[in-house]
Amino acid sequence: KPIPTKPGQEKDDTDLFIDSDQFPPGTVEIEIVFISQMGDIFNRPMLAENITEGIIKKIEVTRSRIAEYPSQKTAAIEFTDTGIHIYGLTTLCGDMITKLGGSVLESRHPMISEEELIQNDPDVIFVIYRSREEEDMARSRFSDSDSELRDLTAVKNGRVYGIPFRDTEAAAVHTAGGLSRISHGLYPDLWNK
């Protein structure tokens, strides 16, 4: 959305674009540091410590249980007006997948085509959404009888999972929730025992 530069100034038609290459990679460690710092700022260090310990424990518990599981080829994507955005290794979502033993689908570009997704044929797909409407729209993209996406291994095996954007990027206190959703998607039978 266009942003006014001064209070009371009318919005103009100038869009603000941020070059995501200028941001440092997203990692679970950065989220832990942020939560700890917020705990100090708001004089809640014990609450922050409990949250960060939960994040660390989720990773440790998952890693301790997956020794016999093969790495899952995983795509984290978001359908946008301009195409399919891929969340790779330098994103928080990609870091979470890697820390939980998954193999993240990478691209040299932030966007991929349906053909590239089909060619890579992931075992698991996480569809990142910002609203319920986006989640519903994404589900229809995989189930539409005219879509070639319905032939993906992840779709055939029922391994396409929605995950809220708030759990995957600058997640802070939602990091543990994101890790939990990803862990359950990567290893559903591990958690259904």
Image (tube, rainbow, N blue to C red):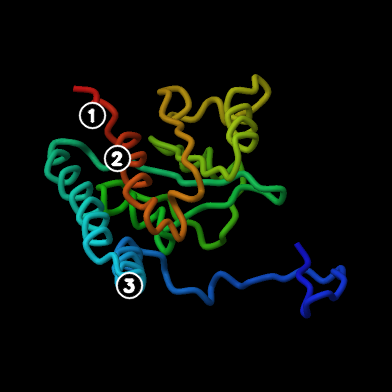
Which residue is denoted by mark 1 in the rendering? 191
Residue on which the image places disc 3:
37
Q: Is residue 124 above or below residue 99?
A: above
Tell me which residue sits at (48%, 50%) in the image: 166
Q: Earlier in the sequence, mark 3 or mark 2?
A: 3
Looking at the rendered structure, the kind of residue marked 1 is Trp
Which residue carries the number 2 mark? 183
Q: Measure the C-alpha gap from mark 3 to mark 2.
A: 26 Å
| Left-right relation of 75 to 32 | right
Rendering coords of residue 3 (x, y %)? 76, 70
The residue located at (31%, 37%) in the rendering is 186
**On-image quarter of the C terminus:** top left
The location of residue 8, given as percent across then percent down, is: 83, 74
How many C-alpha atoms fall within 10 Å of the one at disc 1: few (<14), some, or many (≥20)? few
Q: Position of residue 64 (x, y in %)?
A: 12, 44
The picture quadrant where one finds residue 146 is top right
The kind of secondary structure element at disc 1 is helix
Label 2 vs 1, first from the N-terminus: 2
Residue 15 is situated, as x and y percent measured from the top left of the image, at: 77, 68
Q: Secondary structure at mark 2?
A: helix
- Picture residue at 31% right of the left edge, 34% below the top: 184
Which one is in front, 121 or 8? 8
**Quadrant in which the N terminus is drawn:** bottom right
What amino acid does circle 3 point to?
A: Gln
Nearer to us of marks 3 and 2 is 3
Q: Residue at x 45, y 33 (%)?
A: 161
Q: Do labels 2 and 1 touch, CB within 8 Å?
A: yes
